[in-house]
Structures are given as structure tokens and as C-alpha cells.
């Protein structure tokens, strides 16, 4: 333990941070059980105590990163929604604490003092909305809704090209996908005028932001003054992305070059972000899903590399090929939103297996993963960038329970299949074939924050499950087919 970690852990003890007991899973694969638990331990370790101008706890992706990052924290919070959603909500307060007078939320806050001049992908609204689905709380909603609306207004003023009707990044670091072939060379020595692109990732993220804002205000503040404007912008931008950024020849989304008014299309994971749209034209949806299911592109051993496997730009260096769990998590949730829950579960299973098996093999959780192996042998981190090599090393950063921890909610929600939505708890098991062959075996999940215990027994027909759930003072029992979806209260009490 370094001196910084020693100080942080001492401060957390003095804070007497109250956290619910850890979730527990028991599935037929022991490495999954152990990896799930170890990842939660690292997630808790990476909580940082109030420091500088922070009003509350904040989260760091890994001990090597000394600050709170906007999109990292948004994805980290999703790992907390199944453990203790109040921790996720409290950690996101950092970006309200440091919101600038013009409405900008910074991409990074260093040691509670230094604030980045950039912003970051706008996932905070989506993150808050998901946490409040698990833990409806008017006080937290009131805390976030107004700052969120101001952040949305800032981006329209500061990062919007009026002529094109699209948003852009100021710098590749704003996008978070630093050395993508869309933005820079591998070592970042060459920059490709990111501020001249109507970026598919950013515009998709803003659609998601507006969808989440409308969901939030519908439940917690229907009279909010920005609702009508948000509705109009959501419809306008959704249509704009589907029309102006869709490359018909390639069958994927691209970026619009403001200078030439032409599409620049490179087959990266960002081209599939529109799967999270509430409304996506059927032909577009089919094309995107077909590419994701293609083993030569994205359906790799650990699925969804950040650049298509058959692309000339694919290399195993950061955002140019390796698997990052935040973008993979987003794609799985996009598949789910488009009604492809079985496909989403298959990808989720192999993402979980990739993280847990690499941990079992190497002893750490990492920043990014090899789409074809459970080790780091072929991975690089901005090869040729000498400064990055000195500061963060030539390989993925270790002890990274940032968005890598999102495989844990994938296991709970998409594989074991228990999740909470606005209307209540949903059961939708998607156990892998290897597990379903083990008749009589049990699959269990315990979520102490919600006082919930779930148990499946795999029936002898190897297609159905005997279900037993305890939620608070209620018990539910019944039989359920694998891949069936029902509301929990539809089982027998």
C-alpha cells in the first residue's frame, strides 16, 4: 500500500462510512463467485474520502488515478446500484460540487482542488436515473435535476455546431476514448481535428442524456422548465443522427466532417452507441446487430473490441482494439433495449468470463482486456507515448475496479436475471447452456441492501428453473423457463 492509499484508508475509517453488506452470488463456476467477490472488494477499496472541496465521498478508477473522472464515476456508480445505490449517488455529487458557473461539469477533479478545463461524456444523467430506479429518492432527485439541466444547456452553447445541427468534442480527452483511430495516432503525436467532427459517440450520448432527463423529471419533477425543450431536442437529435450520421454504404454510423460535409466512417464501437436509443429504425437496428454478432468484427472471445477485429485500424492498444467494459456494458444495455435480451446475456456472460478468468489467471483487475485471450501479453498502452509510459505504464492499469466492475451488475441483471425497474422487480434468467446442463445445481444471488435472496434450481428438463425468492417479508415461488421474463409479483406468494 502506497502512502496515498494509506492516507485514504485512514480517512475512510475516521469517516465511518456506512455501506450495505456485499452482494453474494453462487453459480456453477467457482471463478465467477470468487471474481465477483474480489471485484467488489476492489470497488470498495477505490472509494475516496472527502478531500479539498469535495462535500462527500468520490470514486477513483484505480489507485494510480488521483482524481474523480466524470464518465468513469458514472459507470462506476452502476456497479453500486446492486450493492448500495446510495454510495453511487453520493459519489456522483462530486460533479455538482465542482460544476462551473456556466454549467460545465469538468471531466476530472484532481485531489479535490484542481479542475480540468474540459468536460467528459455526459453519462451522469443516465447514471442517476438508473440508480434512482433501484432507490427512488426525492431528495437525491432534487439535488441532481437542476445541475443536470444546466449541464445540458452548457453543452448546447459550448459544443454545438449550428450549421450541422450536431455536437462535437473540443479535445480527444473529452471523448474519453483518447487514442481512437477517429481522433489521434496510437501515441497521440498526431491529432485529427476532433473539434471539426459531429461525433457519433457524443451525439448518441446526448440522446441518451435527454431520454434519461425526461424519465427523471417524469417521475420526480414533471413541472421542470427544461422538459419541453428537452423533448424537442431529443426528437430533433435522434432524427439528425439517424439521417446525417448513418453511412448507408457501410451499414454503420460515422462522424460528420464539418469542413467537407462528408461522413468519415471507421468501424469502431462508437458506431453502435445508437442501440441505446428508445427509437431506432428497424433496418438500422438489424445492420448494427448483424455486425456485432459477426465473429470477424465484434463477436470475439471477449466480445465487443473497441475497433472491429477485421479493420485495418485494429491493434491491441487501448481504444484501438482492446475491450473496455464501459463501452461493452453500454452495448449490452443497448441490445437489451432493442429487445435482444438473449443476445445481450450471451455477450454479458463472455464479458464476465473475460474479466473473472483474467483475474484468476493474473491476479488483478485491469483497465482493458484482450478480446482473444485471458491475459495481457499482447496488450499495449499508447505505445510510443513516452510520457504515458512513465506515468501509467506500458500495459493496462492494474487494480482497476472502475467501470470494469460493471461486469458484476451484468452477472446479476443479465445472466442471473434479477433487476429493479420503475414498476418493480423483474425476473429474466438467461443462464448459459453450460450451467443449464447441470440438473439439480443451484444458482443463488443475495442483495442485502434490498433484503432480497434469489435461488434457482435447474430442473431435470434442463430448460426450466425452480424459483424461490425472498424479498423483505414476502416469499415468491414457482417455475420459470430459462429466457422467460416476468414481474416478480406474478410468481406465487
Image (cartoon, helix red, strand yellow):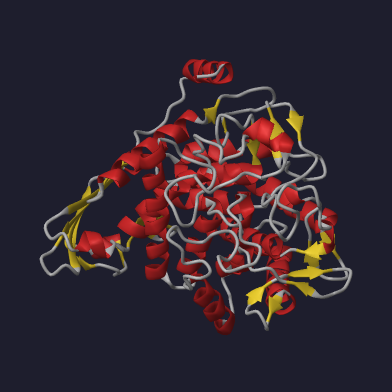
Name the spot of residue 345 as percent of width and height, x first. 38, 63
Nearest the eye: 375 or 15: 375
Nearest the eye: 339 or 318: 318
Nearest the eye: 326 or 389: 389
Name the spot of residue 258 as percent of width and height, x first. 86, 68
Name the spot of residue 213 as percent of width and height, x first. 62, 57
Q: Is residue 453 left or right of residue 440?
A: right
Which quadrant of the figure has residue 192?
Answer: bottom right
Name the spot of residue 141 as percent of width and height, x first. 57, 46
Residue at image x 56%, y 29%? 63
Q: Is residue 71 visible?
A: yes
Q: Is residue 100 left or right of residue 432?
A: right
Residue at image x 58%, y 56%? 216
Q: Is residue 98 visible?
A: no
Q: Quadrant of the C terminus?
A: bottom left
Which quadrant of the figure has residue 283?
Answer: bottom right
Residue at image x 50%, y 49%? 369
Is residue 117 depicted above or below 434 in this figure? above
Q: Is residue 333 left or right of residue 361?
A: right
Q: Is residue 44 left or right of residue 368?
A: left
Amino acid at each position: 500500500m502506497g502512502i496515498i492509499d494509506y492516507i485514504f484508508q485512514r480517512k475512510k475509517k475516521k469517516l465511518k462510512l456506512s455501506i450495505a453488506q456485499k452482494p453474494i452470488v453462487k453459480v456453477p463456476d467457482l471463478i465467477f463467485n470468487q471474481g465477483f467477490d474480489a471485484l467488489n472488494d476492489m470497488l470498495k477499496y477505490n472509494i475516496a474520502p472527502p478531500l479539498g472541496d469535495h462535500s462527500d465521498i468520490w470514486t477513483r478508477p484505480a489507485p494510480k488515478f488521483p482524481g474523480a473522472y466524470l464518465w468513469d464515476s458514472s459507470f462506476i456508480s452502476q456497479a453500486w446500484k446492486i450493492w448500495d445505490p446510495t454510495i453511487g449517488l453520493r459519489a456522483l455529487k462530486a460533479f455538482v460540487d465542482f460544476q462551473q458557473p456556466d454549467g460545465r461539469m469538468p471531466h476530472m477533479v484532481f485531489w479535490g482542488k484542481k479542475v480540468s478545463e474540459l468536460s467528459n461524456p455526459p453519462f451522469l444523467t443516465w447514471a442517476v436515473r438508473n440508480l434512482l430506479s433501484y432507490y427512488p429518492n426525492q431528495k437525491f432527485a432534487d439535488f441532481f435535476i437542476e445541475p443536470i439541466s444546466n449541464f445540458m444547456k452548457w453543452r448546447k452553447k459550448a459544443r454545438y455546431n449550428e450549421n450541422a445541427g450536431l455536437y462535437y468534442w473540443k479535445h480527444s480527452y473529452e471523448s474519453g476514448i483518447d487514442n481512437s483511430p477517429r481522433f489521434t495516432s496510437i501515441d497521440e503525436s498526431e491529432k485529427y481535428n476532433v473539434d471539426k467532427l459531429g461525433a457519433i459517440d457524443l451525439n448518441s450520448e446526448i440522446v441518451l442524456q435527454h431520454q434519461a432527463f425526461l424519465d427523471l423529471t417524469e417521475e420526480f419533477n414533471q413541472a421542470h422548465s427544461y422538459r419541453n425543450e428537452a423533448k424537442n431536442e431529443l426528437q430533433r437529435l435522434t432524427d439528425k443522427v439517424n439521417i446525417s450520421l448513418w453511412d448507408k454504404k457501410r451499414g454503420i454510423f460515422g462522424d460528420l466532417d464539418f469542413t467537407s460535409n462528408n461522413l468519415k466512417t471507421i468501424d469502431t464501437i462508437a458506431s453502435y452507441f445508437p442501440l441505446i436509443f428508445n427509437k431506432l429504425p428497424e433496418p438500422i437496428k438489424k445492420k448494427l446487430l448483424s455486425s456485432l454478432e459477426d465473429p470477424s468484427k465484434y463477436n470475439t472471445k471477449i466480445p465487443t473490441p473497441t475497433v472491429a477485429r477485421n479493420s485495418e485500424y485494429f491493434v491491441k492498444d487501448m481504444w484501438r482494439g482492446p475491450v473496455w467494459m464501459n463501452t461493452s456494458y453500454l452495448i449490452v444495455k443497448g441490445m437489451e433495449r432493442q429487445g435482444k435480451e438473449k443476445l445481450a446475456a450471451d455477450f454479458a456472460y463472455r464479458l464476465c468470463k473475460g474479466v473473472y478468468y483474467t483475474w484468476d489467471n493474473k491476479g488483478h483487475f485491469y483497465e482493458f482486456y484482450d478480446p482473444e485471450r485471458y491475459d495481457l501479453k499482447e496488450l499495449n498502452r499508447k505505445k510510443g507515448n513516452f510520457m504515458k509510459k512513465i506515468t501509467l505504464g506500458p500495459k493496462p492499469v492494474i487494480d482497476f475496479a472502475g467501470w470494469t466492475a460493471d461486469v458484476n451488475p451484468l452477472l446479476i441483471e443479465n445472466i442471473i436475471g434479477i433487476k429493479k425497474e420503475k414498476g418493480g422487480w423483474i425476473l429474466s434468467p438467461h443462464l448459459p447452456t453450460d450451467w443449464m446442463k447441470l440438473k439439480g445445481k443451484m444458482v443463488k444471488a443475495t442483495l442485502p441492501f434490498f433484503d432480497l435472496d434469489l435461488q434457482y434450481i435447474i430442473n431435470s428438463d434442463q430448460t426450466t428453473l425452480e424459483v424461490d425468492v425472498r424479498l423483505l417479508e414476502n416469499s415468491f415461488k414457482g417455475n420459470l423457463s430459462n429466457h422467460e421474463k416476468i414481474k416478480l409479483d406474478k410468481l406465487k406468494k
